[in-house]
Image (cartoon, rainbow, N blue to C red):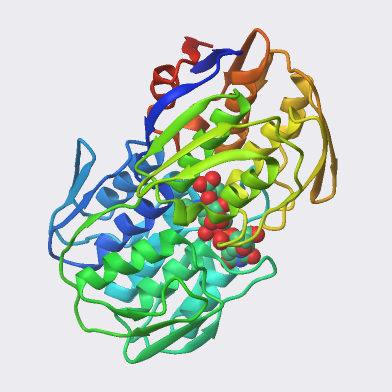
Amino acid sequence: MDKLVIEGGVRLKGEVIISGSKNAVLPILAATLMTDEPCVIKGVPNLRDTATMLKILRSLGKSADFDKGTVTVNSTGVKNFIADYKLVSTMRASFCVLGPLLGKFKKAKVSLPGGCAIGLRPVDLHIKGIKALGADIAIESGYVVAQARNLKGCHVYMGGEYGSSVLATDNLMMAAVLAKGKTIIEAAACEPEVVDLAEFLIKMGAKIKGYGTPNIEIEGVKYLGGATHHIIPDRIEAGTFMLASLITNGDIIIKNVLHQHLGALIDKLEESGAFVQKGLNSIRVGAKRKLKPVNTTTLAYPGFPTDMQAQIMSLMAVTPGISVITEKIYPDRFMHIAELNRMGTHIQKEGPHAIVEGVKSLSGAPVMASDLRASACLVLAGLVAKGKTSISRIYHLERGYENLEYKLSKLGAKVWREKE
Ligand code: EPZ
């Protein structure tokens, strides 16, 4: 197993090109199960999670080729309706094959995702949605077993204790496009990745309105054809590089990014004193003067993304003064605090809040990644720390960041891999 080693203290400069969005491509690949015609998906990031979703499609009988950022899913029919625990347990997003299988074949057996480092992540809203369409659901030996003679359009409220759910909205939307009649999803997730999925489904022949708002309306159709689609850029990867520029007091131009998808983050960074210049599909980020501490609360889109919480914590950890970070989506998503404190940060967890007292400098140390975004936060801390930081379990990073160390090296970072 590899670890990532970073020698901190270099001001990052130059240009970086953002890859396609992990959280958009996964449900879009799952949606290809709903047609017997070929689909071509472009701008696909080469990630562990992409590979896992392709393995799942193949295990269900699809043939899927991945070449230089393009996935071609051929029209071989689905022969198997079971998404296996072995694959689903490695990636929760696999659960979003439930909607497509049920929508298209009126039956599905999908493993329950199991535990996750960032907190309890139930699937009750997913089940509520597909039950509302008329499916019979049973939980057997760790699997959701769903079947229906017909799926019938419905009106369903999908808000949960922590607000809307991205993948539950996706699952329900995909099951509903082939149901009889109209479905209204109330309190739907509005994330750009949900919009990208809806646009792909519409290219396949689906009838969907209101996507990107809390009220989505779907008119069921009999058949979906193949389609060609280009994935949106990854706003979380872009956000991570914006913070890499600020934490190293650098000057980076981020390319292939839509600033409209990063409104809450840009607003927070400008409040802190960052220089953010928005272009058509680029953003230039640098620190025009000493940053000041800001408080952050994570919310569903268009609020501040929980997937940027750990990364902004690294920045606030080296910004003199006190800031409070409140995690409203995954109240326990703070595994990174203990690792950051090993590098000399002063961060205290109080329930769903982290109280961050900014320090002048960090010292490099061996640390351990616990999940995807926590590993990104440790990379950012390593970029500013004195000396060497070595991050183990970087397979977490490879799940969601394409060629991270290559992209960082091109910006001047001293980063390399070593065997554990
Ligand atoms: C998506 O996960 C993203 N993953 C996550 O990104 C992201 O953190 C999350 O949305 C929130 O923005 C993908 O898109 C593949 P949710 P998802 O259902 O859809 C609760 C990353 O780092 N909830 O929107 O699984 C849930 O526990 C990953 O790239 C229920 O209570 O998240 C959470 O508190 C990590 N019941 C809240 O809703 C349900 O049935 C939002 O979760 C479903 C969710």
Q: Position of residue 62 (x, y in %)?
A: 20, 54
Write down which quadrant ligand 1 falls in.
bottom right
Hey, which quadrant is residue 109 in on the image?
bottom left
Specify the farthest residue to the front. 288
Q: Is residue 113 visible?
A: no
- Please name whichever residue, 183 or 316, is drawn nearer the observer in this view of the structure: 316
Q: Is residue 225 visible?
A: yes
- Please name whichever residue, 110 or 39, is drawn nearer the observer in this view of the structure: 39
**Which residue is at a point 26% across and 72% down the rendered structure image?**
202
**Which residue is at a point 54% across and 55% down the rendered structure image?**
263
Specify the farthest residue to the top. 387
- Please name whichever residue, 224 or 304, is drawn nearer the observer in this view of the structure: 304
Establish if 367 lies above or below 234: above
Q: Position of residue 185 (x, y in %)?
A: 48, 81
Establish if 41 lies above or below 358: below
**Which residue is at a point 77% across and 29% down the rendered structure image?**
338
**Which residue is at a point 34% across and 52% down the rendered structure image?**
232
Hey, which quadrant is residue 148 in on the image?
bottom left
Q: Position of residue 257 (x, y in %)?
A: 39, 46
Establish if 370 lies above or below 226: above
